[in-house]
Structure formats: C-alpha cells, structure tokens
Amino acid sequence: MKPVVDRLTKEFEGKVEVRRFVDSSPEGDKLAEAFGVQYVPTFVFVNSDGSTAGMQVGEMTEVDLRARMDALK
C-alpha cells in the first residue's frame, strides 16, 4: 500500500491532507483510539469540517482509494 499512498499523496497535495501512522506513538495512539482503529491498514476519511466520511479496514485498490479521496469535501 505504501507506493500507492505515496503516489496519491503527491497527486492530491494541496487538496487532501494525508497523515500516516505506522508505529506506536502518543499521537498515533491518540488518533487510533479516537477513530476506533484496531487493525493495519485502516483508512479513515475525514472531511474538511472534521466529520468522518468513512473508514476502510484492509487494503484498497488505487482506484478505490483515489475515488474516496476525490469524494472528500
């Protein structure tokens, strides 16, 4: 997933903020708890107003991930 996420992070720069937490850190632990994340990978999609637009547990295709990112407001 890393190459796909890296590619889309560059493509959506300035439009979508991508945050990646892959280790146990205080910030990552806090976010995981806030969103109920238990498994890796988990994608949490958040609109600009802070509302959760959806969550996906497990890998996604590049096409599906791009569509989810396109739909964010």
Image: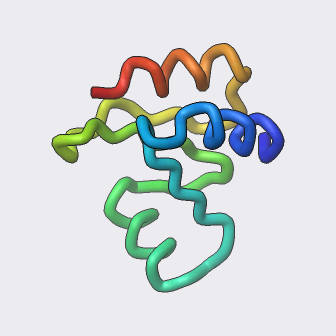
Along the line of sight, which residue is nearer the eye, 41 or 66? Answer: 66
Q: Quadrant of the C terminus?
A: top left
The quadrant where residue 38 appears: bottom right
User: Which residue is painted at 45% across and 20% down in the image?
Assistant: 70
Q: Is residue 60 left or right of residue 48?
A: right
Q: Is residue 72 above or below residue 51?
A: above
- Residue 47 place in picture, x, y as percent: 28, 36
- Residue 40 place in picture, x, y as percent: 67, 52
Q: Quadrant of the N terminus?
A: top right
Which colour scheme appears in the figure? rainbow
Q: Residue furthest front?
A: 14
User: Which residue is painted at 67% across and 14% down in the image?
Assistant: 63
Q: Residue furthest right?
A: 3
Q: Residue furthest left?
A: 49
User: Which residue is painted at 76% across and 35% down in the image?
Assistant: 4
- Residue 68 place in picture, x, y as percent: 48, 22
